[in-house]
Amino acid sequence: MVPLIVFIAPYLTRLFENSILEVDKGIVEAAQAMGASYWEIVRYFLLPEAKGSLILSVTTGTIGLIGATAMAGAIGAGGVGDLALTYGYERLNFPLMLFTVIVLIVFVQAIQSIGNHYSAKLRNH
């Protein structure tokens, strides 16, 4: 668990930074002109404007984490990657290996579709 957190934390941080940097500078200037403090600008202006992009960032990070767990399983950490490698590839059980890969693909596509749906919903506010 710790290596996965170490893997995903900087990745998500960079994605979040890009999402917040996408917000129009005019919004920040307007907030400053109204006398908003730094935390008010972040809470009431930046985060609501970046919400759709932040959801896509979490979606991308989640999919990256699924890939990392599958790779970790391939080197002995257990889980789906270990199942596909040990029982599918090494024991020449092609149907099991194919089923495992298909389940991972369906899972990733479902996460991506849900993330895209909610992001589009929030961007059209």
Image: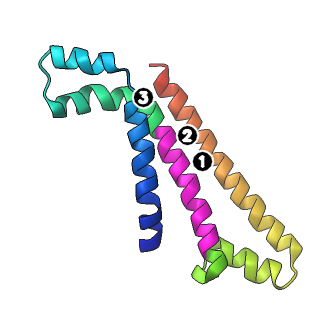
Residue depicted at 47% across the width and 34% down the height: 53
| Residue 82 located left or right of residue 26 | right
Mark 3, mark 1: which one is toward the viewer? 3
Mark toward the start of the polypeptide (3 vs 1):
3
The kind of secondary structure element at disc 1 is helix
Q: Pointer 1: what residue?
A: 111
- Specify the amino acid type for callout 2: Gly
Picture layout, residue 16 above or below residue 88: above
Q: Quadrant of residue 116?
A: top right
Picture layout, residue 62 above or below residue 43: below
62 is within the stretch colored magenta: yes
| Residue 45 located left or right of residue 112 | left
Q: Choose between 86 and 99: the one closer to the eye.
A: 86
Mark toward the start of the polypeptide (3 vs 2):
3
Q: Position of residue 32 (x, y in %)?
A: 18, 19
- Specify the amino acid type for callout 3: Glu
Residue 108 visible to the viewer = yes
Local packing at callout 3 (Cα closer than 10 Å; few below 14, some 14-19, many 20+) is few
- Specify the amino acid type for callout 1: Ile
58 is within the stretch colored magenta: yes
Q: Pointer 3: what residue?
A: 22
**Magenta-drawn segment:** 55-72
Q: Pointer 2: what residue?
A: 115
The kind of secondary structure element at disc 3 is loop
Local packing at callout 1 (Cα closer than 10 Å; few below 14, some 14-19, many 20+) is some
Residue 1 visible to the viewer = no
Q: Position of residue 40 (x, y in %)?
A: 18, 29
* Mark pair 2, 1: CA separation: 6 Å
Image quadrant holding the N terminus, namely bottom left
Picture layout, residue 56 above or below residue 106: above
Picture layout, residue 62 above or below residue 33: below
User: Looking at the image, do the residues carrying marks 2 and 1 touch, with CB atoms under 8 Å apart?
Assistant: yes
